[in-house]
Structure formats: structure tokens, C-alpha cells
Image (tube, rainbow, N blue to C red):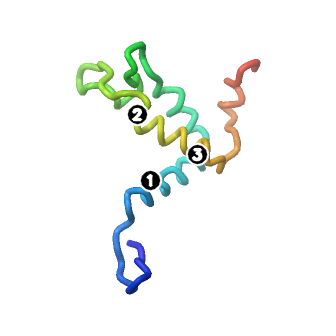
Amino acid sequence: MHTDGSDGSRRPPSPDELWAGIVAEVATMPDVMANLLREHQPDAKGYCTGTGCGSAGRGMPATRWPCSLHALASEAKGAGASPRSVSEERTAPGS
């Protein structure tokens, strides 16, 4: 709960505040960011091929790319809150 400030009443966090908190948390986990960005890529028709983005029981992509997990990892990476992970360094071009 957050304090509104005007009258001191408490209110639940807004969706934007929740999203910012999740982005900040993921930004501290470089391996998680790298895995999400690597796994959640578009197929030839523009659907995400990542785990959890397909239709249940069929494995067919059902979520348009970029999916919310790719967007989360991308925004967290852009936040610059964490150093490059060892796995990212090993897979960097020219490694």
C-alpha cells in the first residue's frame, strides 16, 4: 500500500508502479534478463516462440511479439541497473 499524500490515506500501487518495481527487480538479475531476451523471440509470422507464450497443450505460438516477458527484460536491460553477466560475455559477438 502507498500513501496518497493528500489526506494520508493508503491506496494500492498503480499498475505503472507495480511494473516499475518488477523492472527494477529484474534489472538486478542479468542472467534472467539474458535468458528472457534470448528465449522470447519472434517467429516468421510475428508470434513469440518463448515458453509460456504458446497455446496450452499445443506448443503453437499464440502471443504476438514482443510479448510482455520480452518487454519486461528489454526495459530492465535498458535501466542499466546491473553489470553484464558472465553468460552474456561468453555469447557476445566475437567471443
**Residue nearest the viewer, comparing 54 with 43:** 43
The residue that mark 1 highlights is 19
Tell me if residue 31 comes above or below residue 50 in the rendering: below
Q: Nearer the viewer, mark 1 or mark 3?
A: 1
Which of disc 3 and disc 1 is earlier in sequence?
Answer: 1
Farthest-out residue, bottom: 7
Which of disc 1 and disc 2 is earlier in sequence?
Answer: 1
Residue type, numbered disc 2: Cys
**Quarter occupied by residue 7:** bottom left
**Residue nearest the viewer, comparing 81 with 57:** 81
**Residue drawn where x is 53% and y is 27% of the image:** 38
The residue that mark 3 highlights is 29
The residue that mark 2 highlights is 67
Dot 1: what SS? helix
Residue type, numbered disc 1: Trp
Q: Distance between the residues labelled 2 and 3?
A: 19 Å
Q: How crowded is mark 3: few (under 14 residues within 10 Å), some or many (20 or more)?
A: some
**Residue drawn where x is 43% and y is 57% of the image:** 16
Dot 2: what SS? loop
Q: In the figure, is residue 64 to the left or right of 78?
A: left
Dot 3: what SS? loop
Q: Can see residue 32?
A: no
Residue type, numbered disc 3: Met
Tell me if residue 80 comes above or below residue 31 in the rendering: below
Q: In the figure, is residue 28 to the left or right of 83?
A: left
